[in-house]
Image (cartoon, coloured by chain):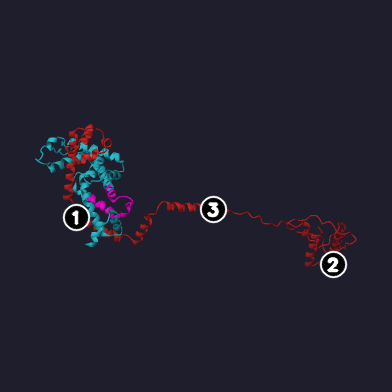
Amino acid sequence: MEDTFFDKMPGLQKLLETKSFSELTGNEKEEVIRNMRQDEYDACHEVIRESKILFAREQKTLAPNPEILRNLLTKMGSSRSKQNQFLLMLQKLFTFRIPAYQPAFILAVFAVLFFILDNRNHETIRYLPRTDTVYLEKQAPASRSPANQSVNLVTPPAKRIEKTTSYKHSHSTLRTDTTAQSPNDQYVKNAYQKIQLAALLKRGHTASDDSALMKFLVAAN
Amino acid sequence: MRFLQNLGKKTDEELLQLIRDGNKEAFSELYSRYSIKLYNFFLRMLDKDHGKAEDFTHDLFLKIIENPNLFDMNRRFDTWVFHIAYNICKNEYRKMAVRNEYQQGPGKDVPVITEAGNDRWDVLKFSEALDHHLKSLDEKHKMVFLLRYQQEMPIREIAEILDCPEGTVKSRLFTTIKKLSEKLCVFDPQIN
């Protein structure tokens, strides 16, 4: 006989547990005889029967010491009082059972939200208009005819003009408060300034004259 | 008294829920249902050592008191509690195996059934012989036999307790019955 005998004959276990060989029907006997001897069957049946009787008797007669229950009940009371109510609440919270699909759904929602919000929060690059300073080294060309030009000896020649970049045409931002002068005018002007300077130096000058002189010199150069 | 009667109608799982809330009556009811079963189970599993059987019964119920949340409400209570009992026995077997390696004492004489009563077996002698031969089996075979015929559990539940397929339980059961029948010499039809 093999260990898988009960698998070969599924009803055998039930027969062994309930009937002796003599109590079996004709068909059952044939089935049993095909797999095991009669004495083997009876021996197995007897072991089961006697064991069941023995165990049933023991269950009625053998009982644990009643002191165990008293001890356990005392411990139950003490363990309950020891446990902090807050800890019990925490325990209940962490052992609270919910279906698995719920946290999975919440996680999925958070994941989707994260990607959506992440795309929105991308840094936008702004191109701000930046002010550049352009120094004009060259004089603006004279727009008037020499006849119309008046020689202004007081007004210094055209200075370096700060110009801001903008969408307007560059000429529009050019400061035109000074009268445009031809190179010859400038020469006359410089000469005049030098004469003035010499006069100042002859007369004896003051601190304010010095600053005026410096301004002239800068303008002249 | 009326309250206790109501508790008697409650299922094991419902009682455990009440134990979680600190209901002592519920614990007493659960204890009355399982203490004798577990005590007898430990007795047979641990070679009739009454002291150990009482200790382990106490420890198991103490676990229920201290950690009732360990119980999975989707399982049956009896399979869960016997699964714990089985684990306790396995640990004890391991300890005993280590002890036996160092203390090789003289073995007990094998009780031999020589006489049979006129109508029935001498129950005491059968009990001794059964104890002795169960002892020679490994704990898995012994466990299957006891769960089936002492606790009268169905094969499916035994498989759940031992975490193995039903086929394995059946084959272990048949092996155990066969070995015991050979050793207990009860296959002689003249005995009956």
Q: Which comes before the other along the chain, label 1 or label 3?
A: 1
The percent coordinates of residue B155 (x first, y second) are 27, 43
Task: Say the numbered circle drawn on residue A66.
Answer: 1
Q: Which comes before the other along the chain, label 2 or label 3?
A: 3
Q: Are the numbered discs 2 and 1 placed on the same chain, yes or no?
A: yes
Q: Residue furthest right?
A: A147
Q: Does the magenta stretch include residue B158?
A: no
Kindly identify which chain the residue marked by label 2 belongs to.
A
Drawn colour of chain A? red
Q: Three-letter amino acid code at disc 2?
A: Arg
Q: Are marks 2 and 1 in contact (CB under 8 Å)?
A: no
Kindly identify which chain the residue marked by label 3 belongs to.
A
Q: For the residue carrying disc 1, how many other residues have a C-alpha within 10 Å: few (<14), some (14-19), or many (20+)?
A: few
The percent coordinates of residue B156 (x first, y second) are 29, 44
Vertical arrangement, residue A203 with respect to residue B160, above or below: below
Task: Name the residue that disc number 3 marks.
Answer: A116
Q: For the residue carrying disc 2, how many other residues have a C-alpha within 10 Å: few (<14), some (14-19), or many (20+)?
A: few
The answer to whether any part of residue B101 appears in the image is no
Which chain is cyan in the picture?
B
